[in-house]
Image: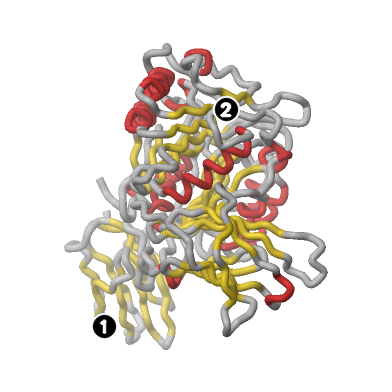
Amino acid sequence: MRKIYILTLVLLLSNTFLLAQITFKEADFSVQHLDNTLAIEFDNASSKDINFKAYDAFTDREVSVSVDTNNPATYILNDIKPAQILKVNYYADSSKLIQKTNYIATASLSTGDIKVFFNHPVDTNYSQIQNAVNLSNTLEDKLIEYINACATTLDIAIYNSASPSSSSGLAGAINSAYLRGVKVRVIYDGSSSSNMIPLLNSSIPLLPSPTSSAYTIMHNKFVIFDANSSNANLPLVWTGSTNWTVSQIDGPDKNSAIVIQDQSLALAYQLEFNEMWGSNTLVPNTTLSKFGQYKTDNTPHNFIIGGKKVESYFSPSDGVNSKIIASINSANSDIDIATMLITRFDITTALLNKYNSGLSNTNVVIDSQNPANNQIGAIQSGLLINHAMVYSGSGIMHHKFMVVDNFNSSSDPQVVLGSHNWSTSAETKNDENTLIIHDANITNQYFQAFAYLYQQAGGVFLPNLTTSQISVNQMTIYPTITSDFINISNPDNKNYSYSIYNSLGQKIQSDFTSSKIDLSNNSKGLYFINLSLENQTKTFKVLLK
């Protein structure tokens, strides 16, 4: 089977950074992560105007803060710990009328390992670093495997769920965890059927979400494992688009799950869980619990996970719609979207504006459901034909992810994913969770899933590879799809040179005025060839199959 290697014309940058090099921008300040300290520099403010204080978000213990002697608008937090969630309070203006609060996560000592799983075929022809994993109808077994390994605490927030019995399937795994001493808490959507819930041990504390007209749905599908463990390599977060019903987790509905081993992220998710739960104990407090539009923005948004930048947001408190649009606007080369629906006009506008600005490699696939205000018609009218597709295969195309700059590792490859449908309900009322992962490998694994679904729906990739030849300044290069040689026809005998790059941006071959390029000793895949003549350089793609 052929494998496609996507090449960039600059060297691939490592995803591993020194902590001292990582700076995150927050609303009113920047946070620089240093060894055992954080440096927080405010924008356009002096120290007398800020009144800055920091606390541990779980214990409310005040953290020691000192002012940078060289910059009075910079505060140094000296006694921080790995995987600590900090709540910072400050006044960012001289009037000191409104106190602001923000949350910061320190880097953990966890592995930062990230695993992605799909329950449907993926197109590994487009694998750049690592093949995406299709678990088919065993995605539930993988979740049960993680539950069986849980050691101390298990917090579950699930929209809808099913299980064959109290002793088997997901209910059986959760009950077994409880019986071996794991502290289990479960939040579920009060309006869904969730036939797994009655099968759980009656001693497991449960909390349904409110169902009055002020709420819509608790649409999360996340699990937090061992968040408070003394072993930093145990905490995990499982999340994604997958509900736990038979059709959702086993198929035919198309879904994904992602598992992240990071204690800082697990603790941030625990903060969100506790807000809905109303307490940090095993007993829910319905007086203090907050769902939907009544929640606050009380979690960190920026994380360093295995050297990667990861963003985390919860709906409806964190303005996720604006984060989706920001990711669209950040694209430099390509956007690929697989989401069940798009009903937000502002997302459509941002997508089409980006396309009209020159980002022609923009591709979309949505499900065949047709809710009110669905924007697929407008998107199809705005993009090239066969680049905005409706998936009408078996089951529901239930994903909610976007891949940005998969084909450009010198940019900022990222994937937006989670439970958040691209709708107004998700933005303003539903309880949802969203991650943005800035990593070429994880991004490409989602692209492999996208490629399968998009092509199944009739979508078209790489239109410049559908022709047998291309012309450059009266020269002809052919064929563009080959198993061995590329020919260059040069009727005017112009002086030229070429360079060929592999998928890591490394030059693998170059020559002057050669009429035939031999690629037969190279790995099968997609290559970029720079052809230089008359003080100009043209780049074209060749597929070696």
- Residue at 49% in and 54% down: 84
Tell me which numbered mark, 1 or 2, is placed earlier along the sequence. 2
Q: Let me know if residue 433 appears in the view.
A: yes
- Give the image location of residue 237, x and y in percent: 44, 41
Relative to 119, does residue 175 appear above or below in the rendering? Answer: above
Residue placed farthest to the top in the image? 165
Residue pointed to by mark 2: 283
Q: Nearer the viewer, residue 386 or 438?
A: 438
- Give the image location of residue 399, x and y in percent: 52, 38
**What is the total number of numbered labels drawn onto the structure image?**
2
Which image quarter: residue 388? top right
- Residue at 53% in and 29% down: 282
Relative to 167, does residue 121 appear above or below in the rendering? Answer: below
At label 1, counting other C-alpha atoms closer than 10 Å, the crowd grade (few under 14, some 14-19, many 20 or more) is few
Relative to 315, does residue 329 appear above or below in the rendering? Answer: below
- Give the secondary structure at mark 2: loop
Residue type for callout 1: Phe
Q: Nearer the viewer, residue 62 or 167?
A: 62
Q: Which mark is residue 512?
A: 1
Q: Nearer the viewer, mark 1 or mark 2?
A: 2
Q: Let me know if residue 376 appears in the view.
A: no
Residue type for callout 2: Val
- Residue at 64% in and 77% down: 73
